[in-house]
Image (cartoon, helix red, strand yellow):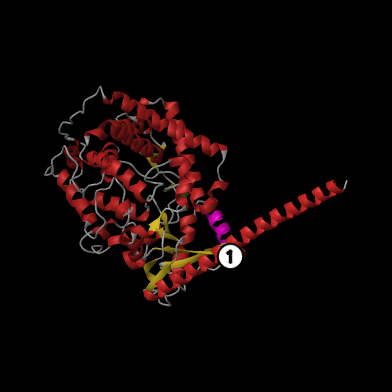
């Protein structure tokens, strides 16, 4: 009996010692991390002082603990399909650089072209995707949209050569899919019938993309599967956008429907890949003949200048990627935003996020004049926007600039698009190759728009269709922005 009592007492002491030991380890680690972070904070502060950084004074106010009211207002605005419109007066009030605090953490949002250039180009190596990679991974997997560093460079290089080859493809690749779109529109072009162009544009883009990249047109998949893919892609994109906004808490939104949608999208893509690989050894590379289609467009539209200007204006007012985010991988600075006047450098500590509000930058009156919200294509004429530089960012910029874009981000980039497209319309450029500085997506859009105008010269808004001020439209935000009400027209 005494032995049993002793053994029990010893076991109790052993359990207490183990808990005390674990507590001591946790306490020591916590103290170490605190001292380490304090040392890093001091070093970062010294770095900021050395570079002339000053604290930012423009901060979005909040009332609830942790800034929860900011999240609620953003959520409500997004649910009402008006998030971007809700944000506009905030930037107008606080300026192009401002701080946002959530749960005790600080981040910055900028629509200052100088800061945008720093994040995306001149200080590119100081930033990474951060939690954005985790939020997107379930949908997009391992690739250039979820990678940083050497892995990203490797993936980018693998894709660069195929995309370069696409730029030298002929316009013949568009014809079949343009004909399919026009046929679908013709079937709906009955007197008084309203047609939504948006889903047709989506199918057209999908068709040209799959045909050029995989060598198989989208219509090689049956209609039911096409609709399934479209719905799955749309839903997966929407949820991925929400996961990105949840940052480190992205995992809270991983529903079974979301996982199934991601699986469906991958299955669809892999089906095209498998077909292409199976045919690689049997099909020789085809050579495209000279395509006269571009000359037909010129016969119908003698001056493509207005088309180019409208195209650029659409990309300005409605950029596909309205807001982008990068996270500092080391202590760095933004050239502007600090101090009372906002003209001093701003210290960005390691781990801080910097949001790039492209949508709002493209609407700044300081960049585009007092009528920045107006749809005025003529603003691209002459030298009115010759020095816009990084104030116009339709396809991202810097090392991560869209692979489908050939036009450099510079003050002359937009006018290069016009001169090269005009040369092609005039028959000066060789018709069986892309103009060297013309973008695939922009050429694709131009062809679609002109073909629609050719076939439906009476295209117009439906009678009684509401016309709201620019920027107040209902918008659907997934990973990209689109009209929540579609693109409704009458064709007869």
Query: Disc 1 designates what residue?
Result: 31
* Residue at x-position 46% and y-position 69%: 93
As for residue 5 lying within the magenta part, the answer is: no
**Which contiguous range is marked in magenta?**
68-77
| On-image quarter of the C terminus | top left
| Residue toward you, 94 or 161 | 161
Where is residue 53 drawn, in percent x and y?
A: 40, 74
Q: Check the image and name the residue furthest to the left.
A: 428
Q: Is residue 492 above or below residue 409?
A: above
| Residue toward you, 27 or 411 | 27
* Residue at x-position 52% and y-position 53%: 248
Q: Check the image and name the residue furthest to the top.
A: 282
Main SS of the magenta part reads: helix
Q: Dot 1: few (<14), some (14–19), or many (≥20) neighbours within 10 Å?
A: few
| Residue toward you, 99 or 204 | 99
Asked whether the viewer can see residue 477, the reply is no
Where is residue 3 drawn, in percent x and y?
A: 84, 47
């Amino acid at each position: 009996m005494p032995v049993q009592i002793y053994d029990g007492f010893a076991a109790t002491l052993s359990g207490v010692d183990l808990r005390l030991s674990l507590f001591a380890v946790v306490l020591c680690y916590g103290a170490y991390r605190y001292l380490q972070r304090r040392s890093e904070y001091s070093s970062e502060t010294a770095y900021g002082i050395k570079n002339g950084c000053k604290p930012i004074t423009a901060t979005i106010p909040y009332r609830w603990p942790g800034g929860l009211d900011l999240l609620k207002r953003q959520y409500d605005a997004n649910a009402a399909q008006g998030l971007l419109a809700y944000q506009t007066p905030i930037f107008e009030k606080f300026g192009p650089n401002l701080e946002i605090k959530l749960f005790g953490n600080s981040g910055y949002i900028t629509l200052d072209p100088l800061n945008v250039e720093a994040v995306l180009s001149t200080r590119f190596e100081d930033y990474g995707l951060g939690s954005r990679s985790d939020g997107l991974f379930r949908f997009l997997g391992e690739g250039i949209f979820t990678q940083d560093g050497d892995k990203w460079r490797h993936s980018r290089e693998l894709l660069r050569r195929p995309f370069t080859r696409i730029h030298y493809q002929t316009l013949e690749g568009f014809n079949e899919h343009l004909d399919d779109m026009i046929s679908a529109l013709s079937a709906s072009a009955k007197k008084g019938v309203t047609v939504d162009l948006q889903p047709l544009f989506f199918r057209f883009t999908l068709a040209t993309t799959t045909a050029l990249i995989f060598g198989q047109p989208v219509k090689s998949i049956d209609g039911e599967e096409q609709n399934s893919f479209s719905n799955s892609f749309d839903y997966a994109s929407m949820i991925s956008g929400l996961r990105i906004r949840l940052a480190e808490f992205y995992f809270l939104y991983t529903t079974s429907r979301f996982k199934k949608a991601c699986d469906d999208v991958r299955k669809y893509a892999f089906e095209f890949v498998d077909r292409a690989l199976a045919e690689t050894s049997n099909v020789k590379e085809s050579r495209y003949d000279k395509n006269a289609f571009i000359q037909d467009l010129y016969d119908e539209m003698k001056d493509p200048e207005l088309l180019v200007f409208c195209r650029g204006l659409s990309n300005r007012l409605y950029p596909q990627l309205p807001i982008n985010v990068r996270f500092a991988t080391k202590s760095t600075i933004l050239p502007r935003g600090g101090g009372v006047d906002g003209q001093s450098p701003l210290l960005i500590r390691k781990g801080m996020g910097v949001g790039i509000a492209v949508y709002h930058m493209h609407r700044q009156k300081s960049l585009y004049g007092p009528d920045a919200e107006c749809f005025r294509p003529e603003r691209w004429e002459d030298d009115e926007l010759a020095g816009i530089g990084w104030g116009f960012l339709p396809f991202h910029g810097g090392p991560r600039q869209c692979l489908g874009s050939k036009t450099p981000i510079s003050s002359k980039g937009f006018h290069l698009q016009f001169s090269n497209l005009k040369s092609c319309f005039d028959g000066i450029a060789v018709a069986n190759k892309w103009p060297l500085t013309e973008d695939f997506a922009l050429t694709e859009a131009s062809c679609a728009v002109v073909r629609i105008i050719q076939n439906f010269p009476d295209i117009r808004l439906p009678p009684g269709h509401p016309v709201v001020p620019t920027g107040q439209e209902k918008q659907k935000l997934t990973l990209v922005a689109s009209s929540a009400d579609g693109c409704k027209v009458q064709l007869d």
